[in-house]
């Protein structure tokens, strides 16, 4: 049972967009609202992308840079909070957290794609 569970988790880490698709389909059936289903699927995928980026970095360079990933998330949060505060004059934590989470989605999609391409190129060069 643990083997099956770890295999399913590994698939979602390797292919986070499969997690997006499955969570979207489930959310769409439960919520009956396309927009809410997309937002929930993006929220789930953001976590999967963060974990995927961490494991891709380990696969490429052989060491964990989790502290850099966490530092990037914290920096994005601080920058977003300051910009939000300057624009609105006050801080609404739920809106800031939602905004930071969605910005991190964009950041980690970019990192995921970049690292996948980098990993493929490095593996091809190793075989040559």
Image (cartoon, rainbow, N blue to C red):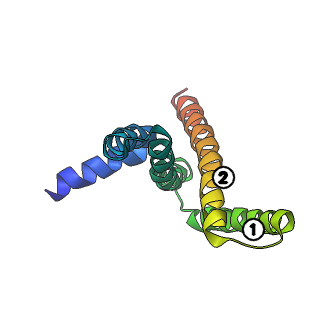
Q: Mark 2 and 1 residues: CB-CB less than 8 Å, in contact?
A: no
Where, quadrant-wise, is the N terminus in this rendering? Answer: bottom left
Quarter residue 73 falls in? bottom right
Residue at the left extreme of this rendering: 1
Which of the labelled discs sits on residue 9, or is there none? none
Q: Position of residue 94 (x, y in %)?
A: 60, 68
* Image x and y of residue 31, in percent: 37, 46
Q: Position of residue 50 (x, y in %)?
A: 52, 55
Q: Quadrant of residue 92?
A: bottom right
Q: Residue furthest front?
A: 32
Q: Quadrant of the C terminus?
A: top right
- Nearest to the observer: residue 70 or residue 83: 83
Between 57 and 93, the one nearer to me in the picture: 93
- Answer left or right for 79 relative to 32: right
- Percent from the top left, x then y, of residue 36? 47, 46
Q: Which residue: 32% across, 51% down?
A: 9
Tell me what residue is drawn at x 54 percent, y 29 percent: 124
Compared with residue 121, is residue 111 higher up or lower down, i.e. above or below?
Answer: below
Q: Residue furthest right?
A: 86
- Residue at 86 percent of width and 67 percent of height: 86
Measured Cα–Cα span from mark 2 to mark 1: 12 Å
Residue at 45% across / 52% down in the picture? Answer: 44
SS assignment at label 1: helix
Q: Which residue position is annotated with label 2?
A: 103
79 vs 128, left or right, is right
Q: In the image, which disc is placed on residue 81?
A: 1
Circle 2 SS class = helix
Q: Is residue 74 left or right of residue 42?
A: right
**Along the polypeptide, which appears first: circle 2 or circle 1?**
1
Q: Is residue 8 above or below residue 63?
A: above
* Left or right of 37 on screen, residue 128: right
């Amino acid at each position: 049972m643990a083997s099956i569970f770890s295999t399913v988790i590994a698939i979602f880490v390797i292919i986070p967009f499969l997690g997006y698709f499955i969570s979207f389909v489930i959310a769409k059936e439960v919520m009956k609202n396309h927009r809410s289903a997309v937002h929930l699927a993006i929220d789930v995928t953001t976590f999967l992308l963060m974990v995927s980026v961490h494991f891709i970095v380990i696969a490429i360079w052989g060491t964990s840079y989790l502290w850099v990933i966490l530092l990037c998330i914290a920096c994005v949060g601080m920058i977003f909070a300051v910009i939000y505060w300057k624009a609105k004059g006050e801080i609404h934590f739920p809106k800031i957290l939602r905004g930071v989470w969605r910005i991190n989605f964009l950041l980690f999609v970019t990192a995921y794609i970049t690292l996948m391409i980098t990993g493929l190129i490095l593996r091809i060069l190793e075989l040559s």
